[in-house]
Image (cartoon, helix red, strand yellow):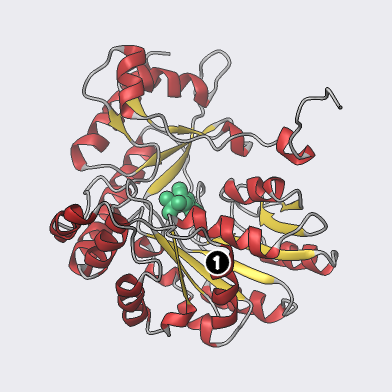
Amino acid sequence: MSQAPVTAYDSILTLMPYEAGKPIEELTREYGVSDVIKLASNENPWGCSPSVTLAITEQLGQLARYPDDSGYYLKQALADFNDIDVKRITLGSGANDLLNILARTFVGTDDAIVYSQYAFVFYSMLAKMQGATGIEVPAQHFGHDLDAMRQAVADNDNIKIVFIANPNNPTGTQLERDAVREFLASMPSSVLVVLDEAYIEYSPKSNNRALLNEFDNIVIVRTFSKAYGLAGLRVGYALSSAPIAELLDRVRQPFNVNRLAMAAATAALGDQEFVNKVRLSNDEQRRWLGKQFDALGLGFIKSHANFIMVEMQVEMEDATAALVNQALLEQGIIVRPLTNYGLPDWLRITVGLVEENMRLIDTLRSILSDD
Ligand SMILES: Cc1ncc(COP(=O)(O)O)c(C=O)c1O
């Protein structure tokens, strides 16, 4: 009998775990700071619609029962909202669950996935999870270079999925609708284009829902974690052709969206007034933050989402964003370093509430003027 230890897939051995934003409780424990603000995970500082509380409360007596596996009510609500047949909707435990289901459904070890440099890190992780080839296409001005991505597809017969985040995380860049349309029109029908619209509510211009009427090889993935403020519940959805949705349904875990999440998402979707208020407040605060970064002499990328990527040109010894990040942590402020994206000089800062943003700027000013 072999005495060799169990080993993982080769590609799992080089897979780095997803780096989540530091939880508030952890910072409190590690640094003994109270009054922590978290601007690290692109969560919604304005919370969620008040209608969610009632929807969840109504479910509390039913926790011993499995959720409705068909997701009937949430799918109906999403079908109305997106003007699409329910058969074209797949529910997920967050957008990441859907991205994972897509990779498991379409990508095997002989296949390849295409994504952009500086695009959401989970795409490259999925390639490794599937033991597939990940092809990272160099970015252009920190955004997707669709011509180069088109060329990457033309150069490789094994590509199954192209992932495009629009707006993109962590750069906040957005693609013009015509450019996305042109890209899709140039794709072979055997290549699936996944448009990750996790931040769509902050940038209605990025909405490519209409392309679902034109192309069968497109999937749009969305989430309730951002503008809807339900990150803690884990719920998202995908829009696709009916045959693709039917394949995804075979692969998803049974009951992959829990009872509270489905009820909350249905209620949240019904309160578009809340979402509009969130967008307007986010716009206003993002503009304000931009002016403050200008005043501090910090470069940043124009963002179309609820975060801003800021360059830390600090005249410190070993001038790095890591030092600024550390100093912010010591002052009880959590932002996101981007070393794992190959962007060691940048920090991604989630747009917070007025008082959080003011505290961030005051703290940054004092950190930067100290040196
Ligand atoms: C571009 C992008 N896609 C997907 C996700 C995952 O979101 P969810 O919380 O719905 O899994 C995120 C989360 O940060 C994201 O930035």
The answer to whether any part of residue 213 appears in the image is yes
Position of 121 relative to 102 (above/below): above
Left or right for 153, reference 69: right
**Residue shown at 75%/48% (left/top)?**
131
Position of 131 relative to 276 (above/below): above
Q: Position of residue 158 (x, y in %)?
A: 82, 64
Position of 217 relative to 335 (above/below): below
Quarter of the picture holding the N terminus: top right
Tally of numbered tags: 1
**Residue shown at 20%/61% (left/top)?**
277
Quarter of the picture holding the C terminus: top left
**Residue shown at 35%/64% (left/top)?**
201
Left or right for 2, reference 167: right
Q: Position of residue 141 (x, y in %)?
A: 61, 52
Q: Quadrant of residue 190?
A: bottom right
Quickly name the residue at label 1.
195
Front position in the image: 281 or 295? 281
Q: Position of residue 239 (x, y in %)?
A: 48, 74
Front position in the image: 314 or 353? 353
The answer to whether any part of residue 173 appears in the image is no
- For label 1, the crowd category at 10 Å Cα-Cα, with few meaning under 14, some 14 to 19 and many 20 or more, is many
Front position in the image: 78 or 184? 78
Q: Determine if the C-beta at disc 1 is less than 8 A from ligand 1.
A: no
Left or right for 298, reference 211: left
Check disc 1 and report its element: helix, strand or loop. Answer: strand
Q: Position of residue 65 (x, y in %)?
A: 29, 57
Left or right for 10, reference 320: right
**Residue shown at 67%/64% (left/top)?**
162
* Callout 1 amino acid: Leu
